[in-house]
Image (cartoon, rainbow, N blue to C red):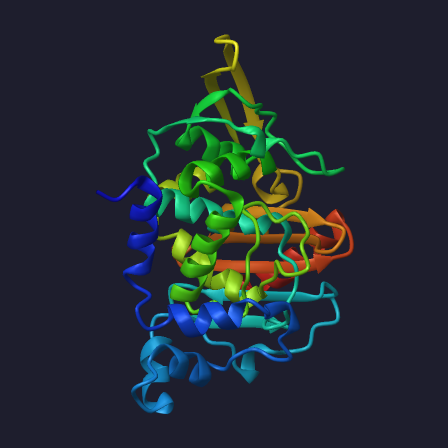
Amino acid sequence: MLDRNQFIKKRIGMGLCLVWIPLFCAACGQSKLERPYTWTERDFTLEGNERADERAGGFAANLCVVDEAAQIPDDAVNAQAAAVFNLTDKQTLYSKNAFEVLHPASITKVMTALIAIKYGNLSDEVTVTDAAVITEQGATLCEIHPGDVLTLEQLLYGLMLPSGNDAGAAIAVHMAGSIDQFAELMNAEAARLGATSTHFTNPHGLTNQEHVTTAYDLYLIFNEALKQPKFREVTGSTAYTANYVDGNGQLVSKTWKGGNWFMTGERETPEGLTVFGGKTGTTNAAGYCLIMASRDELEKEYISVVLKASSRPNLYDNMTEIIQKIVN
């Protein structure tokens, strides 16, 4: 009988019979990529037995593709990378450096949440281990401690709202046995989605030179996550109260709050749009980052991403500028 970790790996691996070996080997050196794969090259890697130009259209049929029409210069967008994708019409509305390899900071947690929801049991009781002790200066925490017992669902909220790096570590150890083994699951899922410029080394996004992705790959990952109703519920929340038992058997109640200024009312959303989910991220290496989902008055849905802005206000200036392209 397979143990839990083997079962999870088998579930993820079922869709990777053609992509696992070539893509994972390529991912090991992603921080050194000189350029991204084109859609033709991605599809050739995924479907190596057929002509790439015949297969590329099929692979991209339900996805937004970045073309020259979307790469319109905009001096007001001064973040390193940015993009807006129309999920309903499968169009890229704006793109700047969408394939540049960068650090994602806590946007990483979108993938962590996706794996937990797709392959985990949210009612599982998780005992927090020493792996959740994060000592890096400036790291955001949901303040859980070794010995605390929470459900996997509660940890999801601790991961996504206060951006708890400790929650990410607790999820990783529960799901895969260790941080490194969980990173393997993350990279397998990224490969399955065609996120060929992505390589993860941890579940939270604290800086590692080999922990990289692109704005376009983050769109692929976030787009997949939005297919999960539970992800929409969690990422669409602005506050959540977790009641659980600590290592001494005492009841604990913590309320976690989200940090997306568009959702908390600290930054006005352009008229005609509603932001219904997202994830922020900040490290010295990554700068200020944000990926989010919004919809217009016709109920069309969009993913927008900004990477490596210079400050938090500058991040929201950039995001406002690019999502205005939806309604202008």
Q: Residue furthest left?
A: 1
What percent of the width, then of the height, locates residue 44?
39, 84
Location of the N terminus (image quadrant): top left
Front residue of 308 and 4: 4
What percent of the width, then of the height, locates residue 234?
44, 38
What percent of the width, then of the height, locates residue 291?
56, 54
* Residue 238 seen in the current view: no
Location of the C terminus (image quadrant): bottom right
Q: Residue furthest front?
A: 1
* Residue 12 seen in the current view: yes
Q: How many marks?
A: 0
What percent of the width, then of the height, locates residue 57?
35, 83
Q: Residue at x 55, y 23 (%)?
A: 146
Q: Residue at x 63, y 65 (%)?
A: 82
Q: Residue at x 47, y 48 (%)?
A: 182
Q: Is residue 234 above or below residue 6?
A: above
Classify residue 77 by image quadrant.
bottom right
Q: Is residue 230 left or right of residue 213?
A: left
Q: Is residue 313 left or right of residue 153?
A: right
Q: Is residue 132 above or below residue 38?
A: above
Classify residue 264 by image quadrant.
top right
Front residue of 118 and 234: 118
Front residue of 67 and 109: 109
Q: Is residue 234 above or below residue 144?
A: below
Front residue of 302 and 169: 169
Q: Residue at x 61, y 61 (%)?
A: 212
